[in-house]
Image (spheres, helix red, strand yellow):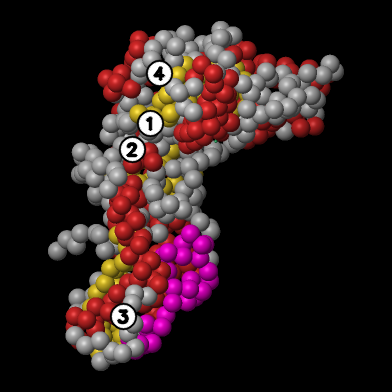
Amino acid sequence: MPPKEVYFDLENSGYVPDDVVDVMLPYFNKRGYGHPAITHRLGWEALDLIIGTKELVAKTLNLANPENLVFTHSGTEANNLAIQGYLIANRDKLRGKKVLVSSIEHLSVIFPAQFVSELLGLEVIKVPVDKEGFVDPEVLKYYVDRDVGLVSIQLVNHEIGTIQKLRDLIEVVRDRNPDVVFHTDASDAYGRVRIDLRDLDVDMMTLSSHKIHGPRGVGVLYVRDGVRIEPILRGQLSVEKLWPGVELTPLIAGFRKAVELAFNNFEENVKYLTSLRDKLLNGILNSVSDVVLNGPSGDERAPDNVNVAFKYVEGEALTIELSGYGVYVSSGSACSSRFLEPSHVLLAIGREYELAHGSILFKVSRYHKGEDIDYALEVLPKAVDRLRTLSPLTPRRA
Amino acid sequence: MSSRIPLPYSPVVLEYFRNPKNVGRMENATVQSTAGSPACGDMIRLYLRIEDDLIVEATFESYGCAANIAAASILTEMIKGKTLKEAWEIKWNDISDKLGGLPPIKYHCSILAVGALKRAIRTYYNEVRKEVPDWLPKNLSTEEKQTMEEEELIERMYSRVPKSSGAENGK
Ligand SMILES: Cc1ncc(COP(=O)(O)O)c(C=O)c1O
């Protein structure tokens, strides 16, 4: 066992703290384990939990009506429900039209868009981003015409932390075509970047529980009144109008707690995350040579995201090397993907293959302490150095 | 970066990854060869010192994943002290077997290692000895062919994306 363990792989899945686990357990066998729509105490408790959680989430979003929120089993499912559900429900009027997604969307947006569009005879267009991952409003303008039916652009990118200037983009879309439905995947923004639905004119929005230290297996889709979507799963409808089956009350209880924890001290949390992020990033830039930051910096970057390319080394090897020290990260390398292709996000921002292969993603969280960052900064140069001594690409300095 | 989690490796792979043998460039190499490319994310450079037909020393450099480093390292151990003809008989699956098995999508790492070896042997006879023995097949071996295919594939994919991002190049 390594002397210390620091988990930075929060993009892939999060750590669930004890106080979140503790509120989940009673919902398996002590309270609220009944079917939420049935008229007895254990059903009422379940219903109460679901309604109460939606009220809480609505409050965090400045959303007047909690009933505009639907629970799903994951962020992936919420994205699928938004994209597939909208395209299928409106297939007649959308035939032959276009779906715009940014080229750095999560695959749970890109894949359903492509799949359903092919079935229904629509066209998916990937809107390019600049070298920091921003969609340029002037560029978007060029893509939005009367034939666009749906646009999906995420609020924060999950790999490179770009905080999209979404208001400007929505304005462009509304101005060019008021009939467009605008979806945003806010999975990596929620709890870390302020979202105010009175101000942000989106029609649909996705959230995911495990991105804020809630349990995996809870997603939320916001759907504005008047936007027609079809359920993508068929079965007995319960509380949810768009999602059949019995709600996962224990997980929803955990999610509610995670929301409370993220929003109780929102500003301080964000400040703390930003300080950890900058400590880690600056530490890396100061202690390792030939490093390139992926994505924007400062206020334009998500407070929890550090993504850097280490030249001359391959990311999977570095991930395993760091794992030996107890530092857990993920990489943009193609090495574990079957197709030799590195991360589509890094390629979309114009990263060369070599740099994409050597990219490492760290996500900091409020459960990290300064000393966790210190430890990572202590072992990182050693790990990179060892792999660089093995690498034929490392320049030999005489 | 969601689906890019390191694969489960055998203890042998991890041991060779952590403590590779015969590392580094060799100044007095008789011949060197390269397989793969930085764009593939996998590249092996092999250095051989050959006396008569005997491999007296073999070292490597590797840019690539853990399997790549382990495959190159174990290969250098396997060929040291072998004649070139004996070394030519090594197949890619001998490497993965010796490593205690590789996940199927990592087979190409052992292919690359053997590809580098066979390229080195060919280069030695073609360019250093300038005399090709009868036992050396004219046609490319499986490993040489697959190595070339991988390099060409990535070259094709690479040409689809802009090569220069205009992005700042480190510090
Ligand atoms: C931006 C983004 N969207 C959607 C998802 C999918 O969420 P989930 O893991 O809950 O399916 C993720 C998680 O990886 C994500 O990062």
Report x, y in % for residue A376. 40, 47
Q: Provide residue B83's location: percent of width, then percent of height.
A: 34, 89
Stretch of the chain drawn in magenta: B82-110
| Residue bearing the label numbered 4 | A147
Q: Return the mark for residue B120.
A: none
Q: Which residue is mark 2?
A: A348
Q: Is residue A2 left or right of residue B49?
A: right
Tell me whether the residue at label 1 lies in contact with that at label 2, contact meaning CB atoms closer than 8 angstroms: yes
> Label 3 is placed on what type of residue?
Lys
Pointer 3 residue: B138
Q: Residue furthest right?
A: A40
Report the front residue among A363 and A116. A116
Q: Residue furthest left?
A: A398
**Distance between mark 4 and mark 2 Cα atoms:** 25 Å
Q: Which callout, 1 or 2, points to the residue nearer the camera? A: 1
Label 3 to label 4: alpha-carbon separation: 59 Å
Same chain for mark 3 and mark 4? The answer is no
The chain containing the residue under callout 1 comes to A
- Disc 3/disc 2 C-alpha distance (Å): 42 Å
Mark 4 is surrounded, within 10 Å at the Cα level, by few (under 14), some (14 to 19) or many (20 or more) other residues, namely some
